[in-house]
Amino acid sequence: MHDGFLRVAAATPSIQVANCPYNARQVIDIARRAAKKQVSAIVFPELCLTGCTCGDLFLQQALLDSAVQALETVLTELQQENMICIAGLPVAADGSLYNCAAVCYQGKLLGVVPKNAATEENRCFAPAPSCREINLCGQTVPFGVNLLFSCETMPDFQFGIESGHLQLTTTRPNIPASEGATVLFHLSADAETVGKTACRKAAVTGLSAGLNCTYVYANAGQGESATDHVYAGHDLIAENGAILAESPLFDTGFIYADTDLQLLRQEQHRSIGRTADAQSHCQKIKFSLPVMPLLLERSVQANPFLPPQLADLPSHCETILNIQAHGLKNRLDHISCRSVVIGLSGGLDSTLALLAAVRAFSMMDLDAGGITAVSMPCFGTTSRTKKNARALAAELGCTFREIDISAAVTQHFHDIGQDPLKQDITYENAQARERTQVLMDIANQLGGIVIGTGDLSEAALGWATYNGDHMSMYGINCNIPKTMVRYLVTHCADTGAPPLSAILRDILQTPVSPELLPPAGDAIAQQTEEIVGPYELHDFVLFYTLRYGFMPHKIYRLACIALGDKYEKKTIKHWLLVFYRRFFSQQFKRSCMPDGPAVYSVTLSPRGGWIMPSDAKAEIWLADIETISTE
């Protein structure tokens, strides 16, 4: 484990019913193979040391004694492995017989967790008792359903045990999960029937999401009796609602995955319904695993704002566009307004804002002519963006106005004593503020409101002019990252009529720029990503900083996996540093951002989405970046 990552596994051995020595060898063989893959914890199916289909043989003392001897063999043979091994067997204690999970580590039994069979018809096994101790394999062992296993060397690694059939609800009590378990290991013997695979997968996925954990599910398979049922050995590993690994049906061996325990702990911290109980219901059992670097085999999505499956992208885009449109519709209805004004530059952000506004007007059965799109060319405006702005407004049926602000800005330079040849921050920001003034005053003339076009990425980096493009009456794009703005406009191009599609595709090919510096000929001179860095890198950092609170070195590691084929390590580190410097220094702009609809769980709204003092220091994060080696 390193940076909160832990490799876990689920296994289905090929067993022989009632042949405990044979079954123990299968468990040991798979466990050793898993250990070579740096697996830190592995779970086997329910009653795997005997077979789950022994029937009344479970009442035979010979089988019970052999099962205990098989467990002793597993303990002895795996005592040199730095790996938790969880195996199922029947255990007789205090006059009752229990279906148990034995938690083995370095030759010791950390605990034995009996199956709670109270809700299941079971002719041999008693339901789980309250926590106590039993003697097993010559050891005094904690015994009970509410055991929480806690790793002292990796505080985020706490696990609990479940057995039996999956319950398709997260509302049932799970005491280890409610008390901080980040991993739940489930030993199962679930027979295969038509349709069961999908239900099982949905249940494991849902449980991992509902309990904010990684759910490691091992199912019985080959070698079990087929007298009445067939067992397919369907193993699953899910993390927080996403499948990390899945075995094929009717296969044996093991699957493994790298789970992010820090991510899970962050999710638990965010879970409002998870409250600490003054009286713990779990017996906590402590153990220590060595902390070793782990070469990750975990896939990392280059754009974490995209849906995991590309086929879901169109519906994902439609949802976002509808959130934007409904947000604007509700605002307009609330203030009884039927007119909006948008500064249309011919760039991506203002294009998306206009598309969403047109959708909102359509929902309200209003003519798109009530949307006034204003092009305000100045010193850096190119004919390409000006032409696209005009064409887009015309194609969408919006009212279009072109107001050249060059003379007004030049006069302003004269008024404040600014050298018009000095292309500094004043030269740039005066243009942005003049544009905002024009939009605000036109909105007053029309009895309307100004729709902001700035996006989430710009807000994070402070790439906006204070009281310029930073301000509006409603920021329709304010919680959409720049990379998603591009996908949304692309979606509209893919689904729009040919004339609109052609305009949008040209806008998509135009470099991102505020166009505040004079062009070289008619080529855009000021390209944003050359100044602040690639937005796909910044959006990646933004997501993991806000959503999970990861430290920069961990985000760097993930970025190298996700985007390392496109950017050198030094480049990733450089822009990581830029992000944190700008993110902390620009909070004062975000503290007074206008309203806008939340689209993702990641938001910078100062009204509850992201609360941060404007004078917070970045030293901890910057110091962490300095520790990153790019070699």
Image: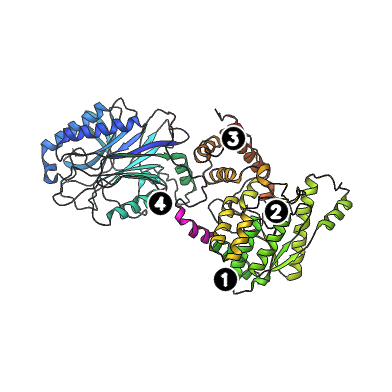
Q: Dot 3, how many residues are within 10 Å of its Cα: few (below 14), some (14-19), or many (20+)?
A: many
**Residue type at the position of mark 2:** His
Element marked by disc 2: loop
Residue 423 higher or lower than 338, as above or below = above
Q: Which residue position holds label 3?
A: 573
Image coords of residue 525 (percent x, y)? 73, 47
Q: Dot 4, how many residues are within 10 Å of its Cα: few (below 14), some (14-19), or many (20+)?
A: some
**Residues rendered magenta in the picture:** 292-320
Q: Are marks 2 and 1 in contact (CB under 8 Å)?
A: no
**Residue type at the position of mark 4:** Gly
Q: Which residue position holds label 1?
A: 363
Q: In the depicted view, which residue is nearer to us: 114 or 464?
A: 464
**Residue type at the position of mark 3:** Lys
Q: Is residue 598 visible?
A: no
The question of residue 6 being in magenta is answered with no
Alpha carbon of mark 2 to alpha carbon of mark 1: how far?
A: 27 Å
Q: Which residue position holds label 2?
A: 470
